[in-house]
Amino acid sequence: MARGRPGRGYRYGRWHGGPDPLAPPYDVAAAVDEIGDQVLSGSGVREALRDLLRRGLDGRRGLDALRRSVRDRLRQARQAGRMDGTLEQVRELLDQAVEAERRALFPDPDDAARLAEAELDALPQDTAGAVRALKDHQWRSPEGEAAYRQIEDLLRQEVLDSSFQGMKQALQAMQDGDSAAMQAVKDMIADLSALVDAHNRGEDTEQRFREFMDKHGQFFPDDPQSVEELIDSLARRAAAQERMLAGMSPEQRAELQDLMGQVMEDLGLQSEMAHLNDALRRARPDLPWGQRGPVPDGEQSLGMGDATTAVAELADLEALSQQLSQGYAGASLADVDEELLEQALGRSAVDDLAALRQLERELERQGYLQRSDGKMQLSPKAVRRLGATALRRVFAKLSATGRGEHDVADAGAAGELTGASREWLFGDEQPLDVVRTVRNAVLRTAGQPRPEHQRRVRIAVEDFEVVETERRTGAAVALLVDLSYSMALRGTWGAAKSTAMALHSLVTTRFPQDAIEIIGFSSTAQVLRPETLAELSVDTLQGTNLQHGLMLARRFLARHRDAEPVVLVVTDGEPTAHLEDDGTPYFCWPPMPETIARTVAEVERVARSGAVLNVFALDPEPGLVEFVHEITQRAGGRVFQPDSERLGEYVVADYLRVRRGSRRR
């Protein structure tokens, strides 16, 4: 962007004032169409959006690809090594110390040497007990004593490093018995406990955190930027330490806990660390404290600090994998931890996640998706687009097969001419009154200046007039769609759903004088709005209650008595349910005579209302075919047996045929 500089012209640079005002609008058309394809195939909106986010778009990795990469990283992390490395090191050093001491005692004939040898022979079999028993031993061998002191240093470093990542480097000075370094550790833990307690009481402040980091920042090489970040890091590591211990054998766990207790007791930190762990639990009760989970199991031995890090990494990767799966109630892209994702897969993975989040935001911001009561739904704008898409597909098939004659070319379809004319209105099908239209344009532009020799007359929308007819007939269309579970089992539900949306789009956009109602029926029937239909899945309840569907269709037709009544039924099975006299649904398979009788009675009522009843049978089962032929004969309609791929073509073509008055009675 350019910025003025007095006396120096302009300077150009990157825009820093928020979103780029010159950036092209975010294009969500491809995403809307992909979601639409899934919805028209029978999926729900949430399922379709989730599928799109899993697959990704425009070269960006989706959630599935990111999760596969995380699972690969998880398999690698499980090969990091064994968790008993510290125990092995302690055992090796202990063996070295005892062996060196025995070599020093063997040549000494003194009774004290024999007593010392007896003490070595009586050492406990477990490593922790042997280390405790040798604590006050008077060493004869400098080599043995050095090995034992090395055990103490190792345990101090590993135990503290398992609680505070990176503590090894900070505690190197303790190897030389630096009391000041030890006191610094004690002061840090005391101040840390006070800080976490204050946080749990809601009394922590930014200033208090900054003072703590200024004083003890050398113990936290990851440099947390807030008290929440500090507590999160410490709590995750403490939980990982418990998870590591839970993953060991009972014998290993008992020995390591004994050694840890000795170290904390020697350092005078046992009660302080116990208090800190309790405070961290209260701060983050959501973490998997003490739960057994995946632990590393490779060939290399890991010390306590490295093993805790490996277990923490495994826990983070497991949590990240779960977040990316989005397979739990209330899942959202906001749940995915960007920091964990970057640690596991790098910055490019975060960019891919950001692209998915932006796509989801833009679908809502641009009005294609909306949330209602926590549920994702298609907006009316998106439903109109889906209906138009479904209609285009149907018309493409109609054009390819030569069926349907969907272009209205017959001028007399609306009735006999009266000789009068009127202003054209959107949706009118009457022929234009050309003479009056041109006359209106000439009168409107008569007083406007025009170039010499310019004789053209420009016609505007308000100039058009149409000739009036004696009667202007619309159609009232009731489309009944079977929602029973067999529609999904036979793979016909997607075609039925797409057909319903295509017909609704055709009626509302091309023939606004017509009325349409979509009725779904399974164990009972219900009127479906287009938005509801887009989200709808087939009913898992048993029953094909055509009787109830026809009852709702009659009520709809009764509200449009001046329109041409049309009833279209899409089904794949005989009626297996009906309404009892008290209105409760009753199901029976095979169909019972009462169900058939009540359904046929409702068909005859529809026929007496003057409506044509056409049935689109999606299953060649003889019982269904015989039944639908019977009811269409009673109602003067026809039976169609299209395959599911051509259902939309048949339904739309039949609607266009019937509304032109070409039905056969």
Image (tube, helix red, strand yellow):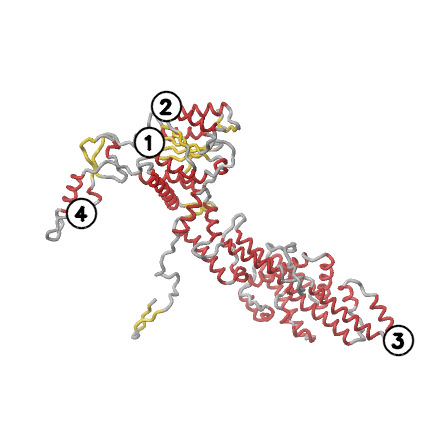
Callout 3 crowding tier (Cα within 10 Å): few <14, some 14–19, many ≥20: few
Question: Which numbered disc, 1 or 2, marks the residue that appears first in the sequence?
Answer: 2
* Residue 608: numbered disc: 2
Q: Which residue is mark 4?
A: 458
* Mark 1 vs mark 2, CA separation in Å: 17 Å
- Of residues 233 and 649, which is closer to you in this image? 649
What is the quadrant of the C terminus in the image? top left
* Residue 110: numbered disc: 3
Question: Which numbered disc, 4 or 3, marks the residue that appears first in the sequence?
Answer: 3
Tag 1's secondary structure?
helix
Question: CB under 8 Å between callouts 1 and 3?
Answer: no
* Mark 1 vs mark 3, CA separation in Å: 120 Å
Q: Is residue 279 visible?
A: no
Residue type indicated by callout 4: Arg
Residue type indicated by callout 3: Asp
Question: Which numbered disc, 3 or 2, marks the residue that appears first in the sequence?
Answer: 3
* Residue 658: numbered disc: 1
What is the quadrant of the N terminus in the image? bottom left
